[in-house]
Amino acid sequence: MDLKCLLFIFSFIRLSGAQDITTVGQMSVQRGQSVIIPCLYHQKYTFSHKYLRAGYFWLLSDYVESSDQRCHGKSVLISDDTSRHIFTVRMDDVQKSGYYWCAIQVPSAFDKRATFFLNVTADSPRLHVNSQSVSGSEYGSVTIVCYHQGQSDVKWCKFGGQCITGASGLLDGASVDIRYGLRNMTVRMSRLTKENMGWYWCSSEDLQMPVYITVDENKSFESPVMAESVQVSPSPRRRTAILFLLPVILEILLIIVIYSALRLFKFCKNRFVQSVTEAEESQYVTMHRKQSSRSYGCAAAEGVYENMTGLKTISEIPASSQKSTRPPLVKKTDLSNVSLGDPDYVNVLKS
């Protein structure tokens, strides 16, 4: 096997899988300091296992750390941001230079990987920043100072995106203003939005220095455009709240209407039943009075009839009975119905 074949195999083994994962090419850090390296991967590997290896040759590299910390080291930590498809490697107290591999485990295939070189220096690094993490408020601004040693072609780039090579430009809607000095580059990003949150880097020749920008929501500030739009039409959140509350309000009103209707129906029903009951009672009293007067009239007529019958009985006493020496017996009931002024009654008493 000749030298060309060996170089081809070496290049294939070294570069295989580098298309689905990217990272910095080379970083410079002072000995004993900490450094964070971002590794950008394809979204199809969101739930795959991520890990770090150390060594120039992939097949001979050493397993250092994993995303699930199955082999947790004291000075290395891997964090996976699945929403942005970036996992970061934090290395503390670095002591020596070397090659490292950001890798993703792929079952039944070659693992995806990308290599970077970490250059550890005793003096100030060739390219560095004061902090790898800066934060700003929404619609506000942030300033990053990249220190170098007079290198040319210093740029400001978004990780996995475009670079600003001139004095100004735009990155995802944010305004970028750059001032170049002899040994530094000052970058100011203004009118920040949530889309501007993520990893950026200073780039100079073969060196990169990653910087993470955090954008916090600022409720006290509104741009003129937003304020004007709020006056014209409600915000989406407010419209959503209105659309959510409208059915609830309608249901409450419907319940109130139904309840009022039922109360009114019950009231009318009770009034109707009460009026019917009063009418029936009045009719019953009237009929009872008529029946009472009719019964009283019948009783009076029966009394007169009994009186007349008693008188008739007295008047029809036979003459033979008058010869008797004993006066005839008269029923007490008959005498009670005979008037004292009646002549027949007087005659009877005399005889």
Image (cartoon, grey):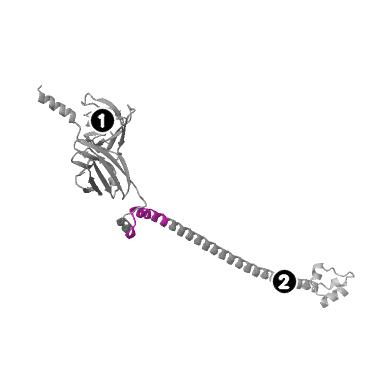
| Residue 103 x %, y % | 25, 31
**Does the magenta run of residues contain 236?**
yes
| Residue 29 x %, y % | 27, 33
Q: Can residue 41 be seen in this view?
A: no
Image quarter (top left, top right, bottom left or bottom right) of the N terminus: top left
Badge 2: residue crowd in 10 Å (few <14, some 14–19, many ≥20) = few
Residue in front for this viewpoint, 304 or 323: 304
Q: Could you say which quadrant of the image residue 349 lies in?
A: bottom right
Residue type indicated by callout 1: Val
Q: Residue furthest right?
A: 325
Q: Name the residue under label 1.
A: 120
Question: From the viewer's perspective, is residue 111 above or below residue 340?
Answer: above
| Secondary structure type for disc 1 | strand
Select label 2 or label 1 by which is in front: 1
Residue in front for this viewpoint, 350 or 99: 99
Q: Name the residue under label 2.
A: 300
Question: From the viewer's perspective, is residue 295 above or below residue 66?
Answer: below
| Secondary structure type for disc 2 | helix
Badge 1: residue crowd in 10 Å (few <14, some 14–19, many ≥20) = many
Residue type indicated by callout 2: Ala
**Does the magenta run of residues contain 178?**
no
Which region of the structure is painted magenta? Answer: 230-250
| Residue 86 x %, y % | 27, 37
